[in-house]
Image (cartoon, grey):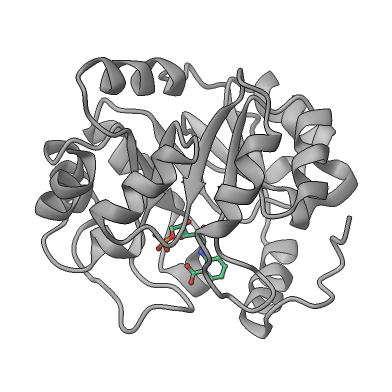
Amino acid sequence: MNASGDELAPDVRAILEAARERPGGETRVSVDARSFPEAVAETEAAGRVPVIAEVKPTSPTTEGVREDDPVELAREMVAGGATALSVLTEPEHFGGSAESLRRTREAVDVPVLRKDFIMHEAQLDVVESDLVLLIARFVGDDLPDLVEAARDRGFQPLVEVHTREELTAALAAGADIVGINNRDLGQLEVDLGTFEGLAPEAPEDVLLVAESGVKTVEDARRMREAGADALLVGTAIMDGDVRQNTETLTQ
Ligand SMILES: O=C(O)c1ccccc1NCC(=O)[C@H](O)[C@H](O)COP(=O)(O)O
């Protein structure tokens, strides 16, 4: 696997370089995590679509910055029916912070994903969350150790993949929550066909999250029909009334 940064979009190379330099926490965290699989099952039982709504103030592919208090946005997303939240903690390219995550998790009772570009173990110790994102392409051969290190701290690791090779690596590392990212980190292009192509390769007992590019109810339906247990949605929820947008996608 390629963790070197070759063939990545310039924005992604910059994200990766900054991530490598970012310090970790000084004290090992220990999390009493809210169960994401249980939250998904409860949403399904209620006949709604499990959505992880993302508090994403900005990104390399978004115009402008949303300056609202992340806690207020998060509350609106939960009121709109979000099963879980994703909070960006990457500061330089996504406008996130560990403090936003800490405050948000305190204010809601749904599971919260820490959305960042974690490169080494000490970076797991920056802030508590229920789920933590590990990107297979970025961490390369360190993936099994990072999955174990995350679980040792009580986190539920969400391992992100984009290719068959990365999916194989995620499963070999013991991942049981896998995000298939429709956004290609090489060109930053989004293709919902990525999820459709890879989802059948995952075992039944793996919880599958369709990440990126879900904009409409039709997109959501398409991902669910392809086997998505949950959807991770940022831009389409952040653009306008976040409560209304979440309600529309979770119905
Ligand atoms: O969203 C970006 O512009 C981006 C650019 C470079 C690397 C990663 C990026 N996004 C990370 C994500 O995984 C998305 O925030 C997440 O899947 C939600 O996607 P979307 O609903 O399309 O905003």
Q: Residue at 26% across / 15% down in the picture?
A: 45
| Residue 228 vs residue 71, the one in the foreground | 228
The spot of residue 149 in percent (x, y) is 74, 28
Looking at the image, how many numbered discs can be counted on the residues?
0
Vertical position of residue 89 compared to residue 186: above or below? above
| Residue 33 vs residue 135, the one in the foreground | 135
Using residue 227 as the reference point, say whether residue 165 is left or right of it: right
The spot of residue 103 in percent (x, y) is 30, 42
Using residue 68 as the reference point, say whether residue 221 is left or right of it: right
The spot of residue 23 in percent (x, y) is 68, 56
Quadrant (top left, top right, bottom left, bottom right) of the N terminus: bottom right
Q: Residue at 48% across / 66% down in the picture?
A: 91
Vertical position of residue 150 compared to residue 12: above or below? above
Q: Residue at 49% across / 46% down in the picture?
A: 210
Q: Residue at 45% across / 78% down in the picture?
A: 61
Using residue 249 as the reference point, say whether residue 79 is left or right of it: left
| Residue 195 vs residue 16, the one in the foreground | 195
Q: Is residue 179 visible?
A: yes
